[in-house]
Amino acid sequence: MMGGMAAAAAVPSFVQAQAQTQSNVWPKASKEAALTRIAFGSCCHEDKEQPIWANVNRFAPDLFIFLGDNIYGDTEDMAVMRGKYAKLGAKPGFQTLRSKTPIIATWDDHDFGVNDGGSEYPKKAESKAEFLRFWGSPNNDPRRSREGIYTSYFYGPPGKRVQVILPDNRTFRSPLLGLTVEPADRGQYFVNPDPKATMLGAVQWEWLEAELRKPADIRIFASSTQVLADAPGFEAWINFQADHQRLLDLIDFAQVNGLFFISGDTHYAELSKKTDGVPYPLYDLTSSGLTQVWEYFGPNRLRVAQAPLAQNFGRLTINWDKPDPEILMEVEMIDGSIGISQAVKLSALQQK
């Protein structure tokens, strides 16, 4: 009890500070202005130094997307969770970002509340409340009236309209199917072939199908875990074989154009590309982490580029002025170098 009270006591000054900048937390980017620079990242430990924000702020994005593990909550005690959000909110680089740049966010396992967790986590509703509080969600946010935190945003005028889809990969997700090898911190999860095992759950699937039918020129599917990686061993969409294939089929059958994926979670950065069994080449740019760095890469036969093992963030630059608009997908490293760079013409992301 004393520990919880101590954590809660540290919060009020942060809440006051947050109230002063809350309008910059909620995505206030103009719906009329076309996005040209988007930054994103994941895996940001609140107890560590965060020098990467200097790089992000120098890039001066029109929008920043947090892809999850935005803090390492790992608790069922919401006073502890709130205290960890307060630590992130107090980071000078993050404060600069929040004062200048619209921010949108989803969560992954650690800010959801439990490592590698899904629907079995008992504090989903309480954790969601802390998430919405910290990220400045207004009272009329649709997420306040439904389970989970899935949402989407639209930016820019017709002809330059960008849709950002933020699925919730935790609230409804079936339990993982165990490890293929030990020890657990280096183990690989089995692919679950059960058609009833799900990443998104039935209600979120209905929502997603409706979202993908709304008009947009570019669609960014911003997933907390990797979408395309075919055998990463760690958590990814491929762990749930039916939902993985359902997503690819939906893109095909619903005639979804202009879509690519961004993702986090892995503690390394890479670019995956899938060309077989899909209507046009699909890309998944993974950026991880803002503070967290793994010591090796997981297996992935769809990897076409990888960055050095160091702190990094993702960059998307959209050139609308070209006759065929171009999307530059990059990963910037902590030293300012570009670890991954891939230009993709919008015409290449269209069904024939």
Image (cartoon, helix red, strand yellow):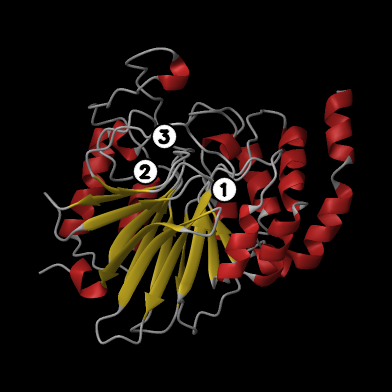
| Residue 320 percent location from the top left of the image | 36, 83
Q: Which mark is residue 251?
A: none
In the rendered structure, which disc, 2 or 3, sits on the residue that comes first in sequence? 3
Q: Nearer the viewer, residue 265 or 300?
A: 300
Specify the quadrant that holds the C terminus: bottom left
Q: CA distance from mark 2 to mark 1?
A: 16 Å
SS assignment at label 2: loop
**Where residue 226 is drawn, which disc sits there?**
2
Question: Residue 282: where, in percent of width, then height?
Answer: 23, 56
Residue corresponding to mark 3: 173
Image position of 247 (left or right of 157): left
Q: Position of residue 90 (x, y in %)?
A: 78, 51
Labelled disc at residue 290: 1
Q: Earlier in the sequence, mark 2 or mark 1?
A: 2
Front residue (pair 16, 141) = 16
Nearest to the eye among marks 3 and 1: give it.
1
> Picture quarter containing residue 34?
bottom left
Looking at numbered disc 2 in the image, what kind of residue is underneath it? Answer: Gln
**Residue shown at 54% from the left, 47% from the top:** 311
Report helix, strand or loop for mark 3. loop
